[in-house]
Image: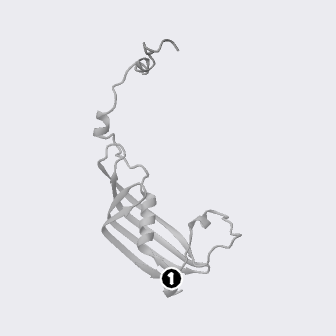
Amino acid sequence: MKIHLTDIDAKTPFKRKLTYTARQLHSENRDVKLRDVAFDLEVRVDPMGYVARYEFKATAEAECVRCGDIVAYPLQGQDWIALRLQPPSEHHLVLNADDMNTKFLAEETFDLDNFVDEVVDLEIPDFPRHEQECVAFESHTAPPTNRPFAGLADLIKPDKNQGDL
C-alpha cells in the first residue's frame, strides 16, 4: 500500500491500522514468518516534511540457529520517523539522535508495506534460538571431562615412515 504524502492535510493527520494474519519476510540470511501483525500509523505534516509515529505487535517465527526447529518470538515496538522529500545537502551533518530517525524519500509516495517489513525486521533477533537449551542441541554435546586436551596427543604422533622432524 502506498501513501501519497502530499494528499495529507496539515490539520488532519493520516491514521491507518493495518493487520496481517500471516506475512512472510525474506531477508538476506533468513526467512521469517510473521503472525498476528497489528500496526498503527499516524502521519502528520511537519514544517520540514512529515512525521510518522507507529506502534506494532507481532509474533515472528524463525528457524533456531542451534537445533533448526521453529522458535516463536513476540515482538512489539513504537517509535517515530521523520519523512523528508528533499535530499540532504552535501553539507548535512547528523547533530543528534533525532537525525538518525530521518528517511529521505525520492518521491512523494511512502510504501507502507515495505516500511512495516523494515520496522518489524529490525526487532527480530539476528540469531534466533530457544530461550531454554534445545533438546537436539543437548544430545550433541560432549560429556564433561577433567582432561580437555586429551584428544590432542593423537593428532601430533609422528609418522613411523617419515622419521623424526
Image position, residue 161 (x, y; %)? 43, 14
Figure check: 52 above or below 13: above
Q: Position of residue 137 (x, y in %)?
A: 32, 38
The image shows residue 11 at horizontal and vertical percentages of: 52, 87
Nearest the viewer among 68 and 73 is 68
Residue designated by label 1: 5
Instruction: Examine the rendered structure and indicate whether residue 104 appears above or below residue 136.
Output: below
Q: Is residue 93 left or right of residue 16?
A: right
Q: Residue at x 49, y 78 (%)?
A: 43
Vertical arrangement, residue 63 with respect to residue 134, above or below: below
* Type of colouring: one colour
Secondary structure found at label 1: helix
The residue lying at 43 percent from left, 61 percent from top is 121
The answer to which quarter of the image holds residue 1 is bottom left
User: Looking at the image, which residue sits at the far right?
Assistant: 91
From the viewer's perspective, tell me whether residue 44 is left or right of residue 143: right
Compared to residue 114, the image places residue 152 above or below, namely above
User: Closer to the camera, 62 or 26?
Assistant: 26
Q: Measured from the top left, where is residue 84 in percent x and y?
A: 58, 76
Number of numbered callouts drawn: 1
The residue lying toward the viewer, choosing from 15 and 85, is 85
Choose top left, top right, bottom left or bottom right for residue 96: bottom right
What residue type is disc 1 on?
Answer: Leu
Quarter residue 134 falls in:
top left
Badge 1 crowding class, 10 Å Cα cut-off, few under 14, some 14 to 19, many 20 or more, is: some
Q: Residue at x 31, y 35 (%)?
A: 138
